[in-house]
């Protein structure tokens, strides 16, 4: 299982590494093309798309991942696709109509620059609903190659078309949104053909009891994910309401850069973990699944914690290199964002007991509590202390979410976080952070590329040596990793 997990991670790697690297390259361009006010409107419009998806479709997307193995065991994939696609059409269509009516009714209360972007947000939601369902199915089918190709095409195609619309045809941030919509529409036929090969769908295959079971699983998740949207994105809207518009753009740009960098590892890990855990639960039961999650939790700590600490230690040169001058002050929030994303990743591992046992209402209530705390703290503190405190409250909210999900899940699937690994990896990461802090003190104000790359190399070396010195990485693991890499690149060793 572990070898399969690592293989999937390496296959999924391009779909996260290349967009992240490209994002780091294009961010200096975007923050120089668009003023913070424009960037802020774009972030708010994308936030509305995310809100609509969280409210209407996120539960159905997770249900597709959760129920596919069970339908496959029963040899009833025609029923699965018929039920899920019918629900997707009804729910996404109904929400799109409601959102459009809301825009018409409240037009006079919406910022004039933001209003046209919100129409594109509704269109993005409708297209993304179907796109996401088929992408989730490709994941649970463990078609990691297909997922990688389509995801890269979506990212790069949308970015290239969007930049063409901006730089050649004179559009502003709406051009970036249109680029994403167009590429997802073009990708849908390929996804449908490859994930539904040989499967028939039709109204005669719809089953009310099956759809009811899927809906019973999905709606609490949608409720919880809407609360999670409050934890993840509501801070932009609070800042927009209480503070100058420039702060929304500044906060959003720096938050996105920081979050995307950590998500390079966190989301890559979670994409590979989900299908393995769901299939292990169906085929091997609780005990083996607990052992699997324990092994994968160790890998998560080994990979993600040092990246989090390193990014936090190099916040100033990182932001200075990647943004226009108007955004540089945002470096203060990088560490809080990085550890928030890390805590979110841990919470997604800890919650599998609830997901696998269909305890989605408890899952949702935990997200609601964490989101409510975050929103309340933001309303209380942002008007006084400005945008930076929103990053602090986000970390508080994610930490609460981790505690709640771990506590609620242990009855159904015990998350055995390896304490020895926590201490050894934490010690190695702390040592790395101390070394990087010292290097920054000796080189205050130098934010050029070459010195920053040198510090990254120094930090990675310190971390690797510390892990070996603490005895966390065994010779057997090093040899196994080397053999797997050589095999994947076609060079047997």
Image (cartoon, rainbow, N blue to C red):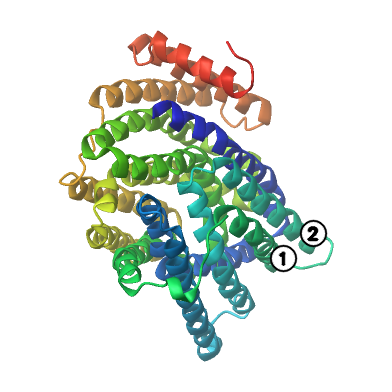
Q: Are marks 1 and 2 in contact (CB under 8 Å)?
A: yes
- Quarter of the rendering containing residue 335: top left
Residue at the extreme left: 411
Does the image show residue 385? no
For the point 33% across and 42% down, the residue is 349
Q: CA distance from mark 1 to mark 2?
A: 8 Å
Q: Which residue is the site of mark 2?
A: 164
Does the image show residue 70? yes
Q: Which residue is the site of mark 1?
A: 175
Question: In terms of depth relative to the viewer, which is nearer, 223 or 460?
Answer: 223
**Label 2 element class:** helix
Residue 5 lies, in percent from the top left, at 44, 32
On screen, residue 439 above or below 356: above
Residue 417 lies, in percent from the top left, at 25, 32
For the C terminus, the quadrant is: top right
How would you rate the neighbour count of disc 2 (Cα within 10 Å): few for under 14, some for 14-19, many for 20 or more?
A: some
For the N terminus, the quadrant is: top left
Query: In the rendering, which numbered label is found on residue 383?
Result: none
For the point 38% across and 43% down, the residue is 345
Question: In terms of depth relative to the viewer, which is nearer, 422 or 131?
Answer: 131
Residue 474 lies, in percent from the top left, at 38, 11
**Label 1 element class:** helix
In primary-sequence order, the first of circles 1 and 2 is 2
Question: In terms of depth relative to the viewer, which is nearer, 387 or 420?
Answer: 420
On screen, residue 206 above or below 59: below
Residue at the extreme right: 168
Q: Is residue 461 left or right of residue 70?
A: right
């Amino acid at each position: 299982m572990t070898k399969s997990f690592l293989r999937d991670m390496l296959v999924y790697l391009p779909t996260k590494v290349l967009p992240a690297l490209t994002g780091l390259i294009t961010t200096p361009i975007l923050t120089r093309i668009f003023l913070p006010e424009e960037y802020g409107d774009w972030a708010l419009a994308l936030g509305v798309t995310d809100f609509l998806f969280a409210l209407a479709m996120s539960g159905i997307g997770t249900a597709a991942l959760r129920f596919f193995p069970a339908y496959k065991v029963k040899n009833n994939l025609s029923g699965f696709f018929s039920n899920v696609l019918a629900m997707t059409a009804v729910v996404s269509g109904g929400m799109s109509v409601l959102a459009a009516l809301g825009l018409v009714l409240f037009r006079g209360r919406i910022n004039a620059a933001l209003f046209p972007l919100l129409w594109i947000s509704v269109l993005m939601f409708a297209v993304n609903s179907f796109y996401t369902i088929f992408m989730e199915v490709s994941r649970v089918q463990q078609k990691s190659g297909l997922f990688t190709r389509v995801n890269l095409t979506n990212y790069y195609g949308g970015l290239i078309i969007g930049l063409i619309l901006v730089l050649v045809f004179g559009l502003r941030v709406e051009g970036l949104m249109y680029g994403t919509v167009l590429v997802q529409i073009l990708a849908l036929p390929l996804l449908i053909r490859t994930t539904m090969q040989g499967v028939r769908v039709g109204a005669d295959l719809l089953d009310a009891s099956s759809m009811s079971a899927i809906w019973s699983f999905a709606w609490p998740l949608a409720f919880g994910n809407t609360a999670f949207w409050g934890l993840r994105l509501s801070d932009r809207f609070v800042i927009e309401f209480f503070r100058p518009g420039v702060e929304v753009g500044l906060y959003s740009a720096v938050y996105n850069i920081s979050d995307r960098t950590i998500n390079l590892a966190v989301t890559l890990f979670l994409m590979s973990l989900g299908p393995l855990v769901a299939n292990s639960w169906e085929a091997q039961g609780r005990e083996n699944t607990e052992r699997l999650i324990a092994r994968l939790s160790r890998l998560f700590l080994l990979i993600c914690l040092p990246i989090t600490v390193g990014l936090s230690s190099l916040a100033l040169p990182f932001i200075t290199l990647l943004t226009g001058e108007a955004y540089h002050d945002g470096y203060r929030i990088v560490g809080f964002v990085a550890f928030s994303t890390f805590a979110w990743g841990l919470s997604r591992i800890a919650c599998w007991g609830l997901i696998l046992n269909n305890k989605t209402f408890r899952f949702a209530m935990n997200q609601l509590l964490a989101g409510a705390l975050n929103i309340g703290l933001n309303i209380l503190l942002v008007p006084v202390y400005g945008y930076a405190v929103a990053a602090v409250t986000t970390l508080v909210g994610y930490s609460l979410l981790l505690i709640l999900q771990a506590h609620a899940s242990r009855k159904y699937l015990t998350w055995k976080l390896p304490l020895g690994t926590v201490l050894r990896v934490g010690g190695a990461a702390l040592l790395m952070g101390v070394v990087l802090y010292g290097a920054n003190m000796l080189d205050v104000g130098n934010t050029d590329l070459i010195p920053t790359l040198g510090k990254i190399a120094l930090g990675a070396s310190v971390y690797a040596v510390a892990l070996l010195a603490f005895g966390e990485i065994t010779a057997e693991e090093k040899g196994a990793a080397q053999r797997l890499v050589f095999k994947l690149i076609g060079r047997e060793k």
